[in-house]
Amino acid sequence: MRADAPLAAHVAESAVVKAIVTELELRGALVYNQHGSAYTGRGRPDLLGVLPGGRAFAFEVKRPGESDSGLGLRQRRELWAWASRGALTLAGVDDVKTVRAALDSAGVLHSE
């Protein structure tokens, strides 16, 4: 590890996914984490689910420091398909703060 490398770049994607899933569940969402499964189709978003009130979401998670420019055409098309049907989508999300901001903007409150 380089001394001048940002610490965030060494956070595993799985740790980011876990933090995001926790935030979604605190807000009452039903979450399906399909990252890394050999049985899912290529290009599918990492996290799929339903927010309280019935709105679907699809999030593609990246390790901190990775840009969403690494998303393949298949992933972009998949996210577009979800968004075009009204789902809340995030591409290349690398921290829980981004998810919180998107959920706040969508009016998804913490469940009681």
Image (spheres, rainbow, N blue to C red):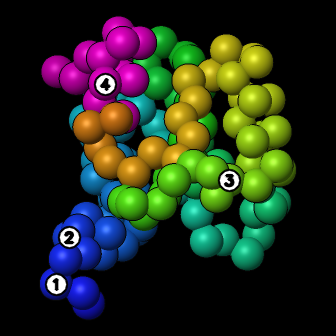
Q: Nearer the viewer, mark 2 or mark 4?
A: 2
Spatial separation of the CA atoms under disc 1 and disc 3: 28 Å
* Point 26% across, 90% down: residue: 1
- Dots 1 and 3: beta carbons under 8 Å? no
Residue 14 falls inside the magenta stretch: no
Amino acid type of the residue tagged 2 in the rendering? Leu
Outermost residue, front direction? 4
Percent of width and height locating residue 91: 57, 41
Q: Quadrant of residue 65?
A: bottom left
Amino acid type of the residue tagged 4 in the rendering? Ala
Q: Which residue is mark 3?
A: 71
Residues shaded magenta: 99-112
Q: Earlier in the sequence, mark 1 or mark 3?
A: 1
Percent of width and height locating residue 52: 43, 19
Establish if 39 lies above or below 74.
below
Amino acid type of the residue tagged 1 in the rendering? Ala
Label 2 sits on a secondary structure element that is helix
Residue 44 in view here: no
Amino acid type of the residue tagged 3 in the rendering? Leu
Name the foreground residue: 71 vs 45.
71
Left or right of 83 on screen, residue 28:
left
Q: Which residue is mark 4?
A: 101
Q: Earlier in the sequence, mark 3 or mark 2?
A: 2
Are there few (<14), some (14-19), or many (20+) residues within 10 Å of tag 2? Answer: few
Residue 84 in view here: yes
Q: Nearer the viewer, mark 3 or mark 4?
A: 3
Q: Which residue is mark 2?
A: 7
Q: Which residue is mark 1?
A: 3
Spatial separation of the CA atoms under disc 2 and disc 4: 23 Å
- Dots 1 and 4: beta carbons under 8 Å? no
Q: Earlier in the sequence, mark 1 or mark 4?
A: 1
